Image (tube, rainbow, N blue to C red):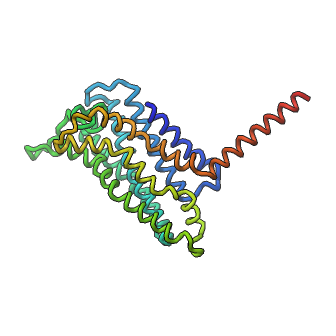
Amino acid sequence: MTSCSLSMVGSLMILLTYVAWEDMRSTVRRMLVFLSLGDFFVALGNLFGVVYDIHANSKSVYCKIQSFITTGFSMYTFLWTMFIGIYMLLIITKRKRTAMKLIPLFHLITLFVPLIIVCVAMAYGALGYSMQSGTRDWCWISDHYMIYQPHFEQPLTSILFWQIVAGKGIEIFAYIVTPIVYLFSRRELGTNESSSLFMDYQILTIQDIDRKLILIPLIFFGARVWGTIRFLGVSTGLTVIKCQFWLAVLQGFGDSAQGFFNAILFVALTRKIRDKFKLLLCCKEEKELESWERFVK
């Protein structure tokens, strides 16, 4: 519950700083806002799972709705994490026109790919409560339903199939792509930041925000890897039973924590935003002092 609440607050902080100050509305920041919206709803869905007592009943409408929200928005955040890295790499390598043309495509992919997947999964009855698929106490892929195709004796889809399609496939792909893209971006920044020809507004914005660039994939990996370890352990039959409890604890915290850590990076550790908050607080104190002086007089 703590990580869910912190992540929701952190995501809202990124959104509010973007809305409140016009000079913070760079393209990179706007993409971070979309990522933060995904983080917010992932945390919200997981919070529902903590607040309510979910019994092992895959027919529960509540559990299906929670699975729909958390599964869809998890894929949404995986895709935005990759696409932000791709965008920054294109900007840094002076392919701004290509980067700007790709933004509408990014929106289409991040919106419709997760939506189509979770809608199809819902239609097939694949979403629900799982007791033995490595996600105990999570509403994700139900192990109470095996979906059969009328013309075949074998199951049309297995639990493992839906787990890969509805999240883990995109997540593992993001584990591979995201570090590569961000490392290339970091290297290009280091190579070109001393060049006077490299100092246009977009680059300066990226340099200001993303000297912490390398931390984005580390946060993503560090937050989400525990659930993947559980998934791989159960799927391959590896012995991870001894540490299942701690993996579950880490997964419960990490799956909801990305919004919180992103807020630390891009709000608390961003000097420009800290200065704005200081100025805002100082102005408020001055106004309160003036009001008090007028009242005393």
The N terminus lies in quadrant: top left
Measuring from the top left, give residue 172's x and y in whole percent.
Answer: 30, 52
At horizontal 27% and vertical 44% (from top left) the residue drawn is 229
**Looking at this view, is 51 or 109 the one in front?**
51
Q: Quadrant of the C terminus?
A: top right
- Residue at the bottom extreme of this rendering: 197
Give the vertical position of 5 relative to 121 (above or below): above
Q: Is residue 270 visible to us here?
A: yes
Q: Position of residue 9 (x, y in %)?
A: 52, 38
Looking at the rendered structure, the number of numbered marks drawn on it comes to 0
**Percent from the top left, x then y, of residue 195?**
56, 74
In the displayed orientation, state which residue is furthest to the right. 297
Instruction: Look at the image and tell me whether residue 97 can be seen.
Output: no
Residue drawn at point x = 17 percent, y = 38 percent: 146
- Position of residue 168 relative to residue 127, above or below, is below
Of residue 93 and residue 122, the one placed in the foreground of this image is 93
Residue in the picture at 39% in, 44% down: 223
Left or right, 219 with respect to 228, comes to right
Percent position (x, y) of residue 220? 40, 49
Q: Residue at x 34, y 54 (%)?
A: 174
264 sits left or right of 289 in the view: left
